[in-house]
Image (tube, rainbow, N blue to C red):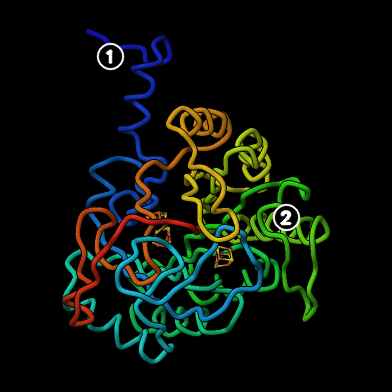
């Protein structure tokens, strides 16, 4: 009997897509670039909170040092590059299947030198580890070659808009070449740098994911255009993250289930959509959503509560 023709039936096609790795070389070796449930559960990541500051001001962002909140932008403490290397050494003894070392905060990894120095030192010592970075992309054109030279192979860029007017509502100001830039000019500068940086990263062979914070009545009708634009630049996957209203956007509401589905459907016309995101802390360790080795690694307990503000 011949296999069912998945192109004839949307349900078959969706099931086939769920079972087919989008990135075979990373499947089971990187939890956030594995696109099957089995692959996602096979490997752990270690986040090293070495990035002390940020160069843009997202209206929904609330960075903090504490032990309780389960969201990006939060860590129990900042690590120096020396401490990050020592932490990696300990984690390799403690965490089974540790395959990925990522830097995703608490600030932006490209706004200072700490992340790139940390990656270079880890890559020299443990070249078998996959190195992963998550950035707002403002400094990507200037620093992506350094990232690649330091061994980084998977990249996430948070792109919340490709329209400067919309972007100005999300990140009203940025620090660019030692000056403050506001409004649409800031939006244009950030978007241009993100797209140039993504294109260069693709040229260098990095696998690129986009994080997009879904903000009702701000960018919710703009998701398809974002996905189309970043796909053209060289991104391969998108992760739509629902806003939990905080900071200057505390007056907004969370996107509904239907709004999230619509956004994913609009993005799926252009990119693979990532669906396992756990909105990790900047010092998370383990398999996202499945195991947590924070206590064993740091010798104290971080009690996680589900709040979120950052992409
Ligand atoms: Fe960390 Fe991000 Fe790398 Fe993954 S998390 S830097 S790509 S190793 Fe993953 Fe966590 Fe979602 Fe990020 S589940 S918040 S997408
Ligand atoms: Fe910076 Fe990320 Fe916060 Fe935006 S969300 S201000 S990029 S740390």
Name above or below for residue 106 compared with residue 255.
below
Q: CA distance from mark 1 to mark 2?
A: 45 Å
Q: Using the image as rendered, state which of residue 39 and residue 169 is in the foreground.
A: 169
Residue 191 marker? 2
Q: Quadrant of the N terminus?
A: top left
> Percent x, y for residue 98?
25, 67
Name the secondary structure under disc 2.
helix
- Side (left or right) of 144 relative to 278: right
**Residue farthest bottom in this picture:** 82
Q: Position of residue 258 (x, y in %)?
A: 46, 27
Mark 2 surroundings within 10 Å by alpha-carbon count, few (fewer than 14), some (14 through 19), many (20 or more)? many
Say which element carries label 1.
loop
| The disc label shown at residue 92, or none | none
Residue furthest front as drawn: 251
Tell me the residue at 49%/38% (across/down): 255
The spot of residue 246 in percent (x, y) is 51, 57
Residue position marked by numbered label 1 in the rendering = 3
Q: Residues within 10 Å of mark 1 (few under 14, many from 20)?
A: few
């Amino acid at each position: 009997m011949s296999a069912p023709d998945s192109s004839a039936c949307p349900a078959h096609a969706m099931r086939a897509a769920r079972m087919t790795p989008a990135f075979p070389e990373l499947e089971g070796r990187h939890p956030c670039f594995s696109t099957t449930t089995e692959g996602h559960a096979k490997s752990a990541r270690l986040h090293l909170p070495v990035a002390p500051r940020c160069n843009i001001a997202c209206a929904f962002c609330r960075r903090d040092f504490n032990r309780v909140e389960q969201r990006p932008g939060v860590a129990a403490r900042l690590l120096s590059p020396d401490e990050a290397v020592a932490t990696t050494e300990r984690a390799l003894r403690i965490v089974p299947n540790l395959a990925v070392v990522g830097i995703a905060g608490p600030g932006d990894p490209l706004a200072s030198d700490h992340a790139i120095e940390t990656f270079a030192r880890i890559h020299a010592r443990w070249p078998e580890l996959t190195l992963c970075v998550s950035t707002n992309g403002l400094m990507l054109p200037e620093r992506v070659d350094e990232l690649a030279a330091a061994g980084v192979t998977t990249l996430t860029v948070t792109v919340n808009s490709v329209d400067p007017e919309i972007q100005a509502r999300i990140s009203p100001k940025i620090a660019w070449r030692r000056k403050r830039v506001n409004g649409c000019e800031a939006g244009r500068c950030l978007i241009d740098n993100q797209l140039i940086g993504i294109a260069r990263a693709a040229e260098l062979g990095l696998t690129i994911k986009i994080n997009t914070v879904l903000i009702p009545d701000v960018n919710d009708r703009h998701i398809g255009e974002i996905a189309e634009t970043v796909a053209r630049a060289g991104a391969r996957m998108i992760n739509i993250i629902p806003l939990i209203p905080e900071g200057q956007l505390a007056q907004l509401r969370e996107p509904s289930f239907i709004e999230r589905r619509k956004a994913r459907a609009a993005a799926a016309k252009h990119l693979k959509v990532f669906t396992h995101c756990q909105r990790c802390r900047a010092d998370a360790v383990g398999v996202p959503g499945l195991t947590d080795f924070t206590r064993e690694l740091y010798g104290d307990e971080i009690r996680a509560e589900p709040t979120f503000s950052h992409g």
